[in-house]
Amino acid sequence: MPLTRPGNSGRRPRRFLPAAAALLLQLLLSNFNCQAQDQTPPEDEEVVTVRTDLVVVPVFVTDKRGRRVRGLTQSDFLVSDDGRRVETNYFAAGAETVALLFLLDASGSTREIITQQQETALALFSHFGARSRVAVMQFRERAELTQEFTRDLRAARKAFQIASLPDRRTAIFDAAREAVRAFGKSGSSAAERRLVVLISDGLDNASAAAAADVIAEANAAGVSFYVIHLPLYAPSGEHLVARKASKGFRELAEKTGGQFLIVGDARSSLDPRAEHDLGPAFRAIAEDLESQYLLGYSAGAFYAEPGTHRVEVQLDNPRRRELRVRQLRSTYEPKR
């Protein structure tokens, strides 16, 4: 619509000067180009296609002293499915692609520690590849997925904020089961290394799920728990002793291929100014994952054989007899 100057309604309206029109057009085109660039993925972004029938088995190898062995290649391993040799068509050394879920105890004294350590925790996620994803789940008597799987660190950071509420009952194993099932709802790739980092004082007084059932479900889904225990201390005579964690709490880590890590001691529990540093625990998790191998093969040929299949991984070189392979997953069920 032509513009007129106030008080000059009887005059012929001025038109935009050609130079001004050209400048306006240039600005519009510039804005359009910026939007187009934001919507276009980088040309050098790597696209990875993974078969949906891929069975991935995480393993690590130790020498006779129990030290992790690195530097092995795909040709060093032999994989069998129910005793039949299969060809591996996926191999990765370390954790290139990770789906990481932080499971945070929002009850008791752990709440404040977790809030203080959010940046340290998210640094663990930043350690992995750009295709990795992170989710956050909080729990008291019930679990709540406060952040679905995302690559956005800003969204994950907000999910670490835990509301200060009166202490309630705590259901660790119910929450652990919900954490395992969250991977199935997220459409995750079979090639992802699925991890739950559980941070808790270990005291469960409300779960309906048994630890053994959660462990079995985690192993079937290829989910490993890394448990960071922040123990509570109580007086016993003249000393303070750590309150014993609920039965099965430690086994969540030890029987799913993760690690059990303890942070804090009796002295720090008495000091209100003590700061719990979870950094060493997160670094231990990262180092553990870097020393692992992922071996994968197509299970399409076994779809006609329902039921549980047993997978076995061995070393190909007989001269490596002093080395030992530990599988973090030994069974799976073919799914159509």
Image (tube, grey):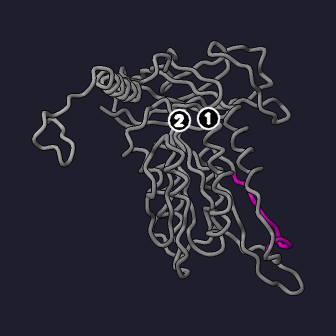
* Mark 1 → mark 2, Cα distance in angstroms: 6 Å
Q: Is residue 250 left or right of residue 208?
A: right
Q: Report which residue position mark 1 lands on.
A: 128
Q: Residue furthest right?
A: 238
Label 1 sits on a secondary structure element that is loop
Q: In terms of image quadrants, where is residue 103? A: bottom right
Q: Which mark is residue 132?
A: 2
Which amino acid type is marked by label 1? Phe
Residue 199 placed where, x, y %? 63, 60
Q: Is residue 4 left or right of residue 86?
A: left
Quarter in which the N terminus is drawn: top left
Position above or below: 43 against 279: above
Q: Answer few, some or many: residues within 10 Å of disc 2's Cα (few below 14, many 20 plus, some between 14 and 19).
A: many
Q: Is residue 49 left or right of residue 136?
A: left
Q: Is residue 47 left or right of residue 290?
A: left
Residue 130 placed where, x, y %? 55, 31
Extent of the magenta region: 260-269
Q: Which mark is residue 55?
A: none
Q: Nearer the viewer, residue 289 or 217?
A: 289
Residue 265 placed where, x, y %? 82, 68
Position above or below: 28 against 273: above
Which amino acid type is marked by label 2? Ser
Task: Using the rendered image of the protein, determine whether residue 299 is visible from the camera's viewpoint.
Answer: no
Residue 256 placed where, x, y %? 59, 46
Task: Using the rendered image of the protein, determine whether residue 328 is visible from the camera's viewpoint.
Answer: yes
Which residue is rendered at x = 35% and y = 24% of the image? 23
Q: Is residue 25 magenta?
A: no
Label 2 sits on a secondary structure element that is loop
Badge count: 2
**CB atoms at circles 1 and 2 under 8 Å apart?**
yes
